[in-house]
Amino acid sequence: MNLSLQKDLFIAFFRSTMLGYGGGPSAIPLVHDEVVKRYKWMDDEEFADVLAIGNTLPGPIATKMAGYIGYRLGGWAGMLNALFATVIPTVVILIVLLSILASFSESSVVEGMTQAVTPVVGVMLLVMTYNFTKQSGKGLGWVWTSILAVVSLIGMQFLGIHPAIIIVILICYALFKPTQKQKENQTS
């Protein structure tokens, strides 16, 4: 077992969990930063694939990503380590903070803190969306990226289709759509 890798896995997921105010979705950009930028365990495309697959499965996204990435890098020990780093700090902090917040729930300071953090989480999600859209534009092309984004938006916001259904449809589309290499082989 590579102890250095295990230490890095723990630190990466612990840091993401501790700074990911607002739960799993707000931690995704932090996990991306650790996994892709800091440690370079994956590239943007592979991380986007892990995120897409994780979103199709039930349960919290942060634990699914931690489990998969930990297992991929460090086997069973890596998976358990990454899951531990993701779950245990949250459980401890949740118990402590809920006890404190319950006693100060009417405080304007607590309400102000919560309202102040919300725009930061929104910006983090916007930056991640921009990066994934840019990556998608490179892979699919801007026309298909735009079409799929608009169709997804209409499906979720106006038709009330659950995001998981749209994700499954897009995964099926990606599985059956011929790749550039397949198109080149057919013309040769």
Image (spheres, rainbow, N blue to C red):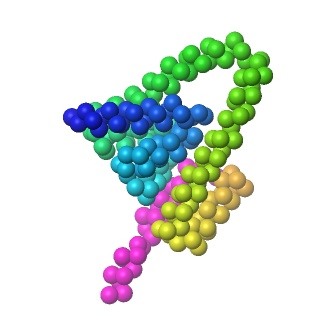
Rendered residue at 41%/46% (across/down): 38
- Looking at the image, the residue that sits furthest to the left is 1
Rendered residue at 57%/67% (across/down): 145
Rendered residue at 45%/70% (across/down): 177
User: Looking at the rendering, in which quadrant would you find the N terminus?
Assistant: top left
**Magenta-drawn segment:** 161-188
Q: Is residue 184 left or right of residue 172?
A: left
From the viewer's side, name the closer residue of 149 and 132.
132
From the viewer's side, name the closer residue of 166 and 36.
36
Q: Is residue 162 magenta?
A: yes
- Looking at the image, the residue that sits furthest to the bottom is 188
User: Looking at the rendering, in which quadrant would you find the C terminus?
Assistant: bottom left
Rendering coords of residue 95 (x, y %): 55, 17
Rendered residue at 54%/63% (across/down): 134
Q: Quadrant of residue 7?
A: top left
Rendering coords of residue 182 (x, y %): 36, 76
Residue 57 shows up from this direction: no
Q: Is residue 52 left or right of residue 162?
A: left
Q: Is residue 171 left or right of residue 75?
A: right
Query: Above or below — where is 85 with respect to 92?
Result: below
Q: Is residue 173 magenta?
A: yes
Residue 172 shows up from this direction: yes
Q: Quadrant of residue 151?
A: bottom right
